Image: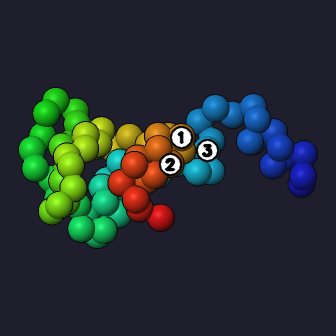
Amino acid sequence: MYNILLELLFNNRDFTIFAMKFDEFHRIIRANGWQILRQMGTSHIIYKKGNRTYPVPYHKGKELGRGLECKIRKDLGIK
């Protein structure tokens, strides 16, 4: 059983545990008070009253990488 899990984690590139869809992440952002100011290409420019604007990528139906998610959360102050 343990070997099968390790094989899935390390050999199958399509299998990711931590992936989140862009739609889900944008819901989290909006729930934390950020609003979409405008869309520019594949990025949404978001803002929060009293804060600066920040570009957040948006690719409908695709998965957001864990590293990018952590970077954006840190920059926006979202836990």
Going by the numbered disc 3, the residue's amino acid type is Thr
**Residue 6 or residue 56, whichever sits in front:** 56
Going by the numbered disc 1, the residue's amino acid type is Gly
Q: Quadrant of the N terminus?
A: bottom right
Say if 52 sits above or below 34 in the image: above
Q: Secondary structure at mark 1?
A: helix
Q: Position of residue 53 (x, y in %)?
A: 19, 46
Q: Residue furthest left?
A: 38
Q: Residue at x 9, y 44 (%)?
A: 38
Residue 43 falls left or right of residue 19: left
Residue 20 falls left or right of residue 26: right
Q: Which residue is mark 3?
A: 16
Q: Secondary structure at mark 2?
A: helix
Q: Which residue is mark 2?
A: 70
Q: Which mark is residue 13?
A: none
**Disc 3/disc 1 C-alpha distance (Å):** 13 Å
Going by the numbered disc 2, the residue's amino acid type is Cys
Marked residue nearer the N-terminal end (3 or 2): 3
Q: Which residue is mark 1?
A: 67
Say if 31 sits above or below 57 in the image: below
| Camera-nearest label, 3 or 2 | 2
Q: Residue at x 21, y 56 (%)?
A: 51
Q: Position of residue 8 (x, y in %)?
A: 75, 42
Contact between marks 2 and 1 (CB within 8 A): the answer is yes
| Camera-nearest label, 3 or 1 | 1
